[in-house]
Image (cartoon, rainbow, N blue to C red):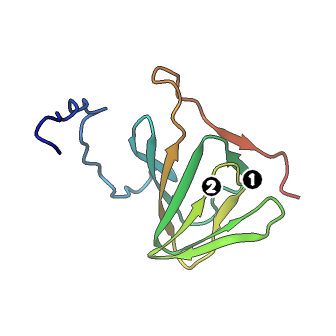
Amino acid sequence: MAATETRPAKPEPKGPVEVVNTAWESGERNVKNLARTDLLTVLLHHWDSGGEIAAHYHTDSDACWVVLEGQATFRDAQDNILGQANAHEAVVVPRNTTYWFENTGEGAAVMFRISARLQGPPDAPRTDDRVYLESRK
């Protein structure tokens, strides 16, 4: 930076730094909201069996599913395999991709879902961008 240039003012943080508990407690629902900002959502999924079996897509967000334990298989509306991930692998699902997933391994499927949303107006209400299909067949 030249001696005559000035640095731009440091922007204000959009929120506090958070530390979240990722432990799974017996009896909790399958999906635990860990963190959320205006752009980012982090969820913890725990499926002893089943999964999100209704075909759907997200209009405003891309997601990365990081498998910690077990195996998850992601399928399209016609049940074709889009991706399969074991522990220490991930599946990236871009927005507008129709998918559903299920636990296809031995034991529980435990995954982080990390998603980023398109940025809209700062004061726009946060809405669910999920669109369900009526049938996978």
- The type of residue carrying mark 2 is Pro
Residue designated by label 1: 55
Q: Earlier in the sequence, mark 2 or mark 1?
A: 1
Q: Secondary structure at mark 2?
A: loop
Write the residue at 16% across / 33% down: 6
- Rendered-image quadrant of the C terminus: bottom right
Write the residue at 80% across / 58% down: 77
From the viewer's perspective, tell me whether residue 17 is left or right of residue 41: left
Does residue 10 lie above or below 42 as drawn? Answer: above
Write the residue at 60% across / 66% down: 49
Does residue 137 lie above or below 87 as drawn? Answer: above
Marks 2 and 1, how far apart in space? 15 Å
Residue designated by label 2: 94
Q: Nearer the viewer, residue 46 or 2?
A: 2
Q: Position of residue 117 (x, y in %)?
A: 52, 41
- The type of residue carrying mark 1 is Ala
Q: Position of residue 81 (x, y in %)?
A: 73, 72
Residue 79 is drawn in which quadrant? Answer: bottom right
In the picture, the disc for residue 27 is none
